[in-house]
Amino acid sequence: MQGSQPSLFRSLIWWTVYSVCGVWAMYLVPGVDFLLPGLLCSMQEGNKAQTIWLMLLFTLIQEGAGLLAFGPGLLWYAMACLLFYLGRSLFEAENIVFILILSAAMGAGHVVIGITMRHLQDVAILLPRLVSDGCLNAVIIPLVWFVVFRLRERELRNVNAA
């Protein structure tokens, strides 16, 4: 998916629309991160400045929307970046198997981060809820990634054709 990058304005509009849709989807399906697939696509594009800005924006959204004090959103996206950059040394970054493995790891990470924050912040979070949210993340992230990847690929193809 690497190649020419769209103009700054076009990228800003695309990612703003994506972020609004992602926040809306997170409202409809609580516990699932619909922003992470966009961050994965940005990392696949190789645009580091864009990825850093998106990671900052998505972390602030997650931290502001959650019931826990500061920390879980930062851990979540840091873990995603770490797993992505480690995993792409073993797999092609755009391979669906890589995304499935990464999503399963993120689902498990959701449970671990939730348990850790539950103990650190003395908040009552039910373990079955954490596990079900982790499983939902593991299933939904690859599906959303596939849609976002295709849409973003089409956007980049339009830029290259122009």
Image: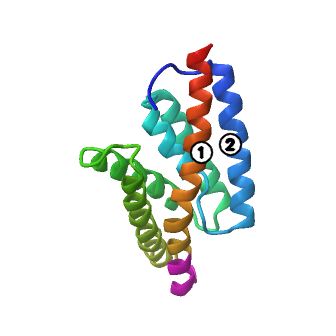
Q: Earlier in the sequence, mark 1 or mark 2?
A: 2
Question: How far across and how far down the image is residue 72, in percent?
Answer: 50, 61
Image quadrant in which the C terminus is located: top right
| Residue 35 seen | yes
Q: Is residue 143 above or below residue 147?
A: below
Specify whether 7 is left or right of 131: right
Name the element at disc 2.
helix
The residue that disc 1 covers is 148
Going by the numbered disc 2, the residue's amino acid type is: Tyr
Name the element at disc 1.
helix
The segment highlighted magenta reads 123-132
The residue that disc 2 covers is 18
Residue 125 on the magenta span: yes
Q: Residue furthest top?
A: 162
Going by the numbered disc 1, the residue's amino acid type is: Val
Residue 137 on the magenta span: no
Location of residue 57 by image quarter: top right
| Residue in view at x 25 percent, y 44 percent | 89
| Residue in view at x 36 percent, y 53 percent | 98
| Residue in view at x 39 percent, y 58 percent | 102
Q: Is residue 30 above or below residue 81?
A: below
| Residue 59 seen | no
Question: How far across and how far down the image is residue 63, in percent?
Answer: 60, 56
Q: Is residue 21 above or below residue 28?
A: above
Question: How far across and how far down the image is residue 159, in percent?
Answer: 60, 19
